[in-house]
Amino acid sequence: MSRNVQEELKQVIDANAVLLFMKGNRDMPQCGFSARVIEILNSCDVEYSTVDILRDPEVRQGIKVFSNWPTLPQLYVSGEFVGGCDIVTDLHLSGQLETMLSAQ
């Protein structure tokens, strides 16, 4: 039986209101971009989940295909792809991220 990574990704995204695909985890980010998004999410006082893409190469590649976005981290809110570190940072600075997150 072959693994359907795209279906697995859809299920985990749908199951979490706010989900960050990142290198490492919220307690120990493994890259500066992931650490920055964690810092932003923590400042927003919102519940969120993370997926460590370093644990599974199929997930690491699969999420890039799923979102049609080549870099990580990747933030999803209400099942929708928001963006990576630069986009999340810009949305946070403009106040739009908090508006999106408060709709949860």
Image (cartoon, helix red, strand yellow):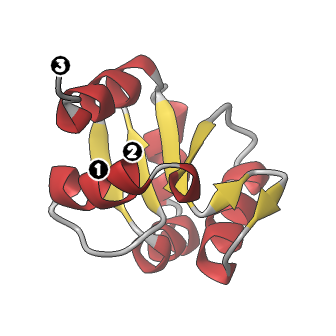
Badge 3: how crowded within 10 Å, few (<14), some, or many (20+)? few
Q: Secondary structure at mark 2?
A: strand
User: What residue does disc 3 label?
Assistant: 1
What residue is shown at x 37% (from left), y 48% (from top)? 59
Label 3 amino acid? Met
Q: Secondary structure at mark 1?
A: strand
What mark, if any, has residue 81 been given in the picture? 1
Label 1 amino acid? Phe
Cα gap from disc 1 to disc 2, whole angstroms: 4 Å
Left or right of 62, for residue 31: right
Q: How many marks?
A: 3
Cα gap from disc 1 to disc 3, whole angstroms: 29 Å
What residue is shown at x 27% (from left), y 41% (from top)? 80
User: What residue does disc 2 label?
Assistant: 76
Q: Are marks 1 and 2 in contact (CB under 8 Å)?
A: yes
32 or 44: nearer the viewer: 32
